[in-house]
Image (cartoon, rainbow, N blue to C red):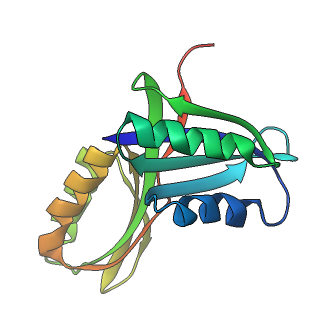
Amino acid sequence: MKHTISILVENHFGVLARVAGLFSARGFNIESLAVGETEDDTISRMTIIVSGDENILEQVMKQLNKLIDVIKVNEISASSVKRDLLLVKVSSNKNNRKDLMQLVDIFRAKIIDISSGSMVIEITGDEDKILAFLELLTPFGIKEVARTGIIALSRGH
């Protein structure tokens, strides 16, 4: 089972390495990791997706709480807002450009750059939406892909 963990940390040099080291030292695989400053530039939020049962999750959260620079650790529940950002460069030409533009429109994506032989598209959404979009782009010829990893916030208070 996948778990989304949100970690507030002090924005100091080496914090990311210590958190990642904790996971690797214990043999836990990080499926997704996104880090960015919060509304307070002295604090960063890490959003980590990890697979495992409840025992693994509990152990990970206990270990994270022991790190000095960690302010708060919590699991993001299913009732949350999760997003992933994808940039994809796909082959395009005058013959397939209209089809690509229709696909972009259907998925509420954006064309960021266009040239005679390719198009760069930006899309945000949940993981299922991103994967579905990539699957439909595959026949056109995907040249490059870059993803942010999942970021998440709890709903409500």
Question: Compared with residue 147, is residue 48 higher up or lower down, i.e. above or below?
Answer: above
The structure residue drawn at horizontal position 45% and vertical position 54%, both measured from the top left corner, is 85
> Which quadrant of the figure contains the C terminus?
top right
The structure residue drawn at horizontal position 53% and vertical position 42%, both measured from the top left corner, is 59
Please provide percent x and percent y for residue 106.
23, 45
> Which quadrant of the figure contains the N terminus?
top left
* Among the 4 quarters of the image, the one containing residue 154: top right
Please provide percent x and percent y for residue 25.
56, 65
Residue lying furthest bottom: 117
Residue in front for this viewpoint, 104 or 13: 13
Please provide percent x and percent y for residue 46.
63, 48
Question: Compared with residue 126, is residue 76 higher up or lower down, i.e. above or below?
Answer: above
Residue in front for this viewpoint, 35 or 60: 60
Task: Please give left or right for residue 59 compared with residue 65 in the image.
Answer: left
Task: Please give left or right for residue 6 compared with residue 31 in the image.
Answer: right
Please provide percent x and percent y for residue 156.
57, 14
The structure residue drawn at horizontal position 41% and vertical position 60%, both measured from the top left corner, is 86
Question: Compared with residue 58, is residue 94 higher up or lower down, i.e. above or below?
Answer: below
